[in-house]
Image: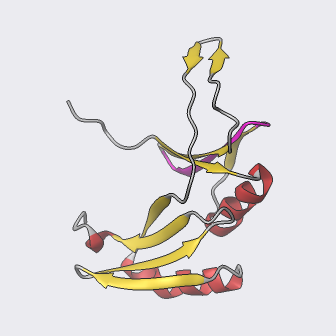
Amino acid sequence: MKPQSILETALYVADLDVSEAFYRDLFQFPTLIADERMRALKIVEGQMLLLFKLGGSTTGEATAGGFIPPHDGRGVLHLAFRIGENEIAAWRENLKRKNVEIESEVEANGGHSIYFRDPDGHCLELGTAQLWNVG
């Protein structure tokens, strides 16, 4: 069997409010859940970005529906968001307007990537589908 897609991706952050504002303001991801432990932002239909307070989920959580196992992450992580070929210049301008420094740009396999950092230093990438030949 094969999964349909990635449902959620998690990052572990020092300040939930700062990180939520970064992702909401830069990418226009709406916040669906906000509590003292995490934020759930909707990327697109059927895909979520979860921001967990660093160290805040190491004991797991009992819910009415069952137990969510403990998890946490340390160090710099990497996420790539897909953009259209015709959106590269607009994204450069959007990052500049939001005072987000572009760390590098890469051309590979006929595709293009723009790399930058979030407030916790996680490596973020805006990339076109041609990078992986995924249409």
Direction front: furthest residue: 75
Which residue is found at the position 47% from the left and 42% from the top?
46
Magenta residues, start to end:
35-45
**Image height of 131 relative to 86, above or below:** above
Quarter of the view holding residue 18: bottom right
Quarter of the view holding residue 75: bottom right
Position of residue 134 measured from the top left corner of the image (x, y, whole percent): 24, 63
* Foreground pick, 5 / 104: 104
Reply yes or no: does residue 40 show up in magenta: yes
**Image height of 113 relative to 64, above or below:** below
* Foreground pick, 32 / 1: 1
Which residue is found at the position 44% from the left and 63% from the top?
80
Q: How is the image coloured?
A: secondary structure
Position of residue 77 measured from the top left corner of the image (x, y, whole percent): 51, 57
Judged left or right of residue 107, residue 61 is right
Position of residue 97 measured from the top left corner of the image (x, y, whole percent): 69, 84
Position of residue 64 measured from the top left corner of the image (x, y, whole percent): 65, 11
Quarter of the view holding residue 105: bottom left
Q: Decide whether the magenta segment is chiefly helix, strand or loop.
A: strand
Which residue is found at the position 62% from the left and 23% from the top?
60
